[in-house]
Amino acid sequence: MKKILIAEDEISLLEMFSSIVENSGNYKITKAIDGEEVIKKIIENLPDIILLDIMMPKKDGIDVLIDIKSNPKTKNIPVIILSNISDKNQIEKALDLGASDYLVKSDIHLKDISNIINKYSTNKK
C-alpha cells in the first residue's frame, strides 16, 4: 500500500483531496495542515508521494520543498504542488527546486488529481 501525505491548510480541501486519493487506489493517507506538521509527518511516515500546498501556516510549501529535497532520506519522494498560485515564476521556482509536478487548484479537474497520484505511484519502486 502506497503512503500519500496531503498537506493543505484549508480543511474542506484537505478532506476533498483525501477522498479523491482514497477512491483512486490502494493508498494510506496522512494529512498535515501546516508546514511544520508536514516535516514531522514525513520523518515519521516516509510517504511515497507528497501533495503539497504552498501557502500554509508556520512554514510555507516552498520552504518545506527545500527541506524535503535537501534531505538524502526524502529527496527522491515525488512532490506534487497543489496551489492556487498560478504565477509562472512561482511554478518555475517550485519545479527548479525539485517538485515533480505543479497543479493549479482552480485549473484542475478532480480526476486530474487521481491520475497524477496513479502516475507517480506507478513510477516509484
Image: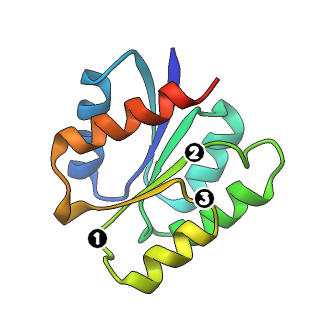
Indicate the secondary structure of the residue bearing disc 3: helix
Which-is-in-front pick, marks 3 and 2?
2
Between discs 3 and 1, the one toward the N terminus: 3
Residue denoted by label 2: 78
Mark seen at residue 42: none
Is residue 16 at least partly visible in the picture?
no
Indicate the secondary structure of the residue bearing disc 2: loop
The picture places residue 13, in percent across and down from the top left corner, at: 24, 51
Q: Within 10 angstroms of label 2, few (less than 14), some, or many (20 or more) residues? A: many
Q: Quadrant of residue 28?
A: top left
Between discs 3 and 2, the one toward the N terminus: 3
Mark seen at residue 84: 1
Residue found 60% across the figure and 29% down from its top: 124
Residue found 24% across the figure and 22% down from its top: 23
Query: Distance from label 3 to label 1 (Cα)?
Result: 20 Å
Between discs 2 and 1, the one toward the N terminus: 2
Which-is-in-front pick, marks 3 and 1?
1
| In this rendering, position of residue 90 left or right of residue 93 | left
| In this rendering, position of residue 7 left or right of residue 64 | left
Mark seen at residue 36: 3
CB under 8 Å between callouts 3 and 2? no
